[in-house]
Amino acid sequence: DEPFGGSNNSFDPYDRRMTSENDEKTNAFVNIRIITCDTNKDGKKEVIMVKNLSAVGRVLKNVKSYSGSEIYNFEWDGMGLTENWRTKKINGYVADYQFKDIDNDGQNEVVLALVLSAGATLQGKSIVAAYKLNQQEGTTLK
């Protein structure tokens, strides 16, 4: 029922040489990946999804503006996906993400490619951020 994903990445699916100038311009937006990973080491993979949050909603077809994001962990319970945990709101939108051990400690971290959108001085800036999964609580990133 809830929209997940969301991305500013798009392409023009039509050959503009074959269309007239009066044709409506429509971009095809590429959604963000969905990852499966065994984060709680129980032998079953969970589904990790990003929800990029938009202040304008998802009403305007060719306007995508994301101010924040959340990462969700779901597990199949035999009938559907059940939410195990989600992060607090992250400033900026997640352009891509992965679970990798970036500091060689044997534990996977959540690595995010973030596009910052808070404040005029941060417009257009991107960063790579890594978060450790809080194994004791199992519900948040620290």
Image (cartoon, grey):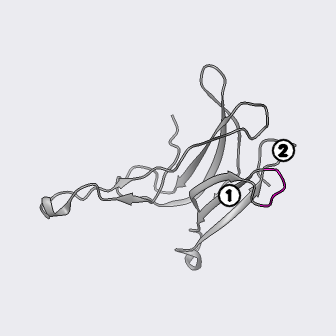
At x 46%, y 49%, the residue is 31
Kind of residue at disc 2: Gln
At x 66%, y 23%, the residue is 77
Element marked by disc 2: loop
- Residue behind mark 2: 135
Query: N-terminal of the two: label 1 or label 2?
Result: 1
Dividing the image into 4 quarters, which one contains the C terminus?
Answer: bottom right
Confirm whether the magenta stretch covers residue 99.
no
Given residues 91 and 10, the one toward you in this image is 10
25 to the left or right of 131 = left
Given residues 116 and 60, the one toward you in this image is 116
* Residue 11 image point, x, y percent: 35, 59
* Residue 134 image point, x, y percent: 82, 48
Tell me the number on the disc at residue 111: 1
Instruction: Considering the whole magenta stretch, tell me its main secondary structure.
Output: loop
Question: Furthest-bottom residue in view?
Answer: 121
98 to the left or right of 17 = right
Kind of residue at disc 1: Val
Magenta residues, start to end:
103-107
